[in-house]
Image (cartoon, grey):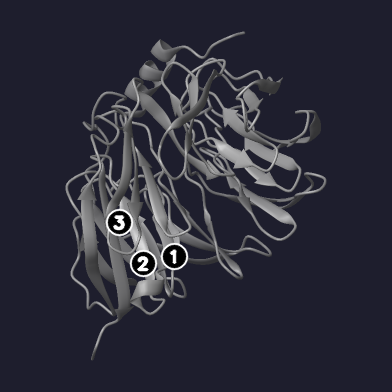
Amino acid sequence: MRRVSILAALALLTLLGGCGLFGEKSNLAPPSALTHFQPTLSITQVWSRDTGNGTGGYAFTLHPALAQGVVYVANEDGTVAAYRATDGERLWRKHLKARITGGVGFGQGLVVVGTRRGLVMALRFDTGAIVWQAQAPSEILAAPVVGPHGVYVASLDGHVTAFGLGHGEILWVASHVEPALKLFLTDRPILNQDVLYEGYANGEVVALRSQDGERVWTTVVARPRGGDAVERLVDVGQAVLGQSLIYVAGYHGNAVALSADSGHILWSDPLSSDHAMALGAQSLYAVTSQSGVVALASATGGSLWSQNALLNRRLGAPALAGPAVVVGDFAGYTHWLSRRTGALMARKRVGEGAIRAAPLVASVTSDHGLPYVFVLSTTGRLTALRFEPKSP
């Protein structure tokens, strides 16, 4: 099986001038200065915990998982831990003898992570004990997906592999030919009933049957353009699922709405992004490759607003929290923007590490059902925030 060259990925990161795989130095345009504004939301830190070494200084993203009142976190040094959402108390911690680069996946009583060497490791959700481990074709940079009938893992070489829930045996492997040069990232598939949706570096979105990996449909949402390798990058990011539609955005590509059943494109709007979008009731929210924040009408793709106050601050993926769109930046700040207008509503720093993963939002029963926002930085700092309208 053909592997994507690590040297090619490193060369591409140098061309892009962004965060190198082994550090945070950048030759990009300087980040926008933080501007003064009148806050309309009050942000309170409820608790904060040091969970480990985070990404270990590497330029990939480790996503936390939240389920049944517990936040699960993985670190590059092999540490996986569970924290109670209400107060941050650590429930268990397991140190794996592996370098974790993909995680965390959760479901069916399992916490699943992937490693630099392509090892997939499934742990018990309540104790962290290892249930099974198995081998994927190559490096894993995306959180595994756990469904009712299997664990699905996208690896850097373009393959999607299905593993059995109870034993980790390979059920099927779906191959995909990737371009020689691509962004050093892989996005996790999205599972909807019996279909997996995955975006690829050649501009394709593919639907796979979860029971056997057979293709349901393939749709090209972006085609390479331009004269040099960087301009021709069309990596498609993680899909977002609506009622009967899926939404994707690509680097040097478009924001696109597709029929989940057929892959037919309903609308397409120019937008360059390497993050998953956030879907509201009638709007899509995206972070562009230059760290602009934009809102699109989910029905048509029409522009609703754009916010450029945070340009070049290397924003992470967005999340929706009450009236706000929440994004983190390279310096550990969370920024809260109005979902209606894009205006800045609040700002809160949670540490020095970059925030790449989309924050997690959930109500916490011990605090009268108020929503908490959980933020994980690249240094392994996990922070729970609470928000409420600011008093006049």
Name the image quarter holding the N terminus.
Answer: top right
Q: Position of residue 212 (x, y in %)?
A: 78, 28
Identify the residue at image location x=68%, y=51%: 246
Q: Position of residue 373 (x, y in %)?
A: 36, 63
Identify the residue at image location x=59%, y=40%: 146
Q: CA distance from mark 1 to mark 2?
A: 5 Å
Q: According to the image, label 1 marks what residue? A: 362
SS state under label 2: strand
Q: Nearer the viewer, residue 165 or 284?
A: 165
Q: According to the image, label 2 marks what residue? A: 372
Identify the residue at image location x=41%, y=51%: 358
Identify the residue at image location x=51%, y=47%: 276
The amino acid type, in three-letter code, at marker 2 is Tyr
The amino acid type, in three-letter code, at marker 1 is Ala
Q: Position of residue 273 (x, y in %)?
A: 48, 44
The mark that comes first in sequence, 3 or 2, is: 3
The mark that comes first in sequence, 1 or 2, is: 1
Q: Nearer the viewer, residue 305 or 335?
A: 335
Tell me if label 1 and label 2 are in contact, CB under 8 Å. yes
Residue 222 in view in this figure = no
Q: CA distance from mark 1 to mark 3?
A: 26 Å
Disc 1: CA contacts within 10 A as few (<14), some (14-19) or many (>=20):
some
Residue most extreme to the top: 1
Q: Is residue 373 left or right of residue 176?
A: left
Tell me if label 3 and label 2 are in contact, CB under 8 Å. no
